[in-house]
Image (cartoon, helix red, strand yellow):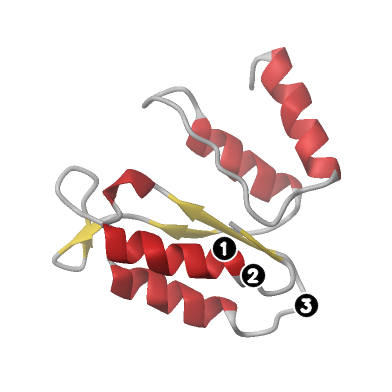
């Protein structure tokens, strides 16, 4: 599915997954596929955050708002026995307030939550 070098890097990551991981790349390189593959390899259904406009997913004109990140923060405060993986699609659509709120989530991870 992936280039052999990418596959090896993912396998190394899976051995010791950090609580925060940034997978980025130009559109179409498979960054989202890699994140989904990591979640699948761990047997986790990820929480995926998409940009929205008028409460509808919109990758063209939508954004990830501070309210969306605050809801995500509240959702991750609940203790669960299994791992949680959060995938932020189109993170570049976050404004400064949302970025700051997301930074708080990264700085204060709950157990078994990976972003």
**Front in this rendered view, residue 29 or 94:** 94
Query: For the residue carrying disc 3, how many other residues have a C-alpha within 10 Å: few (<14), some (14-19), or many (20+)?
Result: few
Q: Which residue lies furthest to the top in this view?
A: 4
Left or right of 61 in this view: 49: right
* Quarter of the figure that contains the C terminus: bottom right
Residue where numbered disc 3 is placed? 81
Q: Nearer the viewer, mark 3 or mark 1?
A: 1
Residue 90 in view in this figure: no
Q: Residue at x 58, y 42 (%)?
A: 35
Image coordinates for residue 2, horizontal then vertical, percent: 64, 21
Gap between marks 2 and 1 measured at Cα = 6 Å
Secondary structure at numbered mark 2: loop
Whether pointer 2 and pointer 1 mark residues with C-beta atoms closer than 8 Å, the reply is yes
Image coordinates for residue 93, horizontal then vertical, percent: 27, 49
Query: For the residue carrying disc 2, how many other residues have a C-alpha within 10 Å: few (<14), some (14-19), or many (20+)?
Result: some
Please tell me which of labels 3 and 2 falls first in the chain: 3
Gap between marks 3 and 2 measured at Cα = 15 Å
Query: For the residue carrying disc 1, how many other residues have a C-alpha within 10 Å: few (<14), some (14-19), or many (20+)?
Result: some
Residue where numbered disc 1 is placed? 106
Q: Say above or below: 99 vs 23.
A: below
Q: Say above or below: 86 vs 11.
A: below
């Amino acid at each position: 599915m992936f280039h052999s070098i990418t596959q090896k890097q993912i396998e190394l990551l899976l051995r010791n997954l950090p609580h925060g991981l940034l997978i980025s790349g130009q559109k179409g390189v498979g960054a989202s596929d890699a994140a989904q593959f990591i979640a699948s390899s761990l047997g986790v259904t990820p929480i995926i955050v998409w940009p929205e406009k008028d409460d509808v997913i919109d990758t063209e004109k939508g954004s990830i708002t501070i309210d969306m990140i605050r809801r995500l923060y509240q959702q991750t405060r609940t203790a669960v026995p299994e791992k949680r993986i959060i995938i932020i699609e189109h993170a570049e659509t976050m404004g400064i307030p949302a970025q700051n709120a997301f930074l708080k989530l990264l700085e204060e991870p709950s157990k078994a939550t990976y972003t």
